Amino acid sequence: MVTVADGVHAYVQEPGGWCVNNAGIVVGEDTVLVVDTAATEKRALALRDTVDALAPGPRRIVVSTHHHGDHTFGNHVFSGPHTLLVSHDAGPAELVRKGTALQSMWPHVEWGHTPTVLPTLTVRAGATLHLGDITAELIHPGVAHTSDDLVVWLPEQRVLFAGDLVFSGAAPFVLMGSLAGSLAALARLRELDPLVVVVGHGRVGGPELLAFTEEYLRWVAALAEQGLADGLSPLETAQGADEGAFAALLDRERLVGNLHRAFHEAAGGAPGARIESAPAMREMVAFNGGRPLRCLA
Ligand SMILES: [Zn+2]
């Protein structure tokens, strides 16, 4: 756990990567805000123990930054009469549609009991939580990582819980959202002028993480433009790409998925419009030389 401001903590699960995500804990006067849970029941219980130790009081608000299972499978561990589950308006339908499908990608992981729990409150553009002396703004930055993204912004502490809009040391992933939308969202997040950025996966940092993600996404957009001009597929474009410093990123195979989204948008596809993820995931394995995607959950 990394304390980033008075009463504000990042729950960081190293080293990040597929399904090993971060959470946030904001301890208000009589309510604690938890930003995301975890992928497995065991990890979610460990997070709950940490929350219990910090704030034994019963009132809790759990905000999901998006529906992806690594951030939500553990929600049921927190659900109960004193907990308000919150997501974006588009979250519940995605939770129902996807269920636990993600788990079949990594059958070796001990997922535990992870029933889908739907939020009680959904927000469209944004909302403000008043937690005594701490104010937390929930902001929907548009379709970016997914169509139901929410970031949590603490304006006084200048702490941003960015969810999967921003990664640290790992490749960003926009297959299920939008590349153009992500760039627009990042510009908006930069305007907030955060001091601390808690990312969805990887180490806590500052605004340089926003800049890094933008740089990566612009590189993907340029690659897509070239790949399309050369008549290549997303996989072929990725295989021929000079990855430079991006080659060292964790889960670098996401480049293939990101190119699928970039190609789709270059052809006029709407942000967040569904692209079948299973074939793109199989191509990521191919890009990885046939090795399965590494999940340490
Ligand atoms: Zn995600």
Image (cartoon, rainbow, N blue to C red):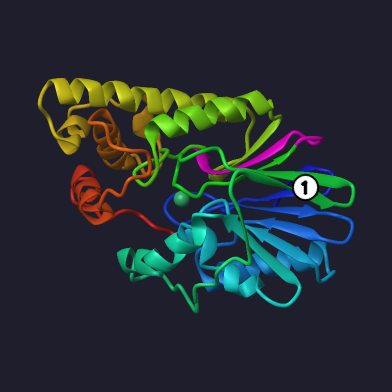
| Residue 68 drawn at (x, y percent) | 46, 57
Q: The magenta stretch spans which residues?
A: 155-166
**Do we see residue 244 in this rendering?**
no
Point 77% across, 68% down: residue? 52
Residue 12 position (above or below residue 167):
below
Residue 158 position (above or below residue 82):
above
Residue 46 horizontal side relative to residue 243, left or right: right
Total number of numbered discs in the rendering: 1
Q: Is residue 254 magenta?
A: no
- Amino acid type indicated by mark 1: Val
Residue 97 or residue 293, whichever sits in front: 97
Residue 151 horizontal side relative to residue 39, left or right: right
| Residue 215 drawn at (x, y percent) | 44, 23
Point 76% across, 73% down: residue? 82
| Residue 258 drawn at (x, y percent) | 32, 38
Residue with the mark numbered 1: 8
Res 234 quadrant in image:
top left
User: At numbered mark 1, what does the secondary structure look like: helix, strand or loop?
Assistant: strand
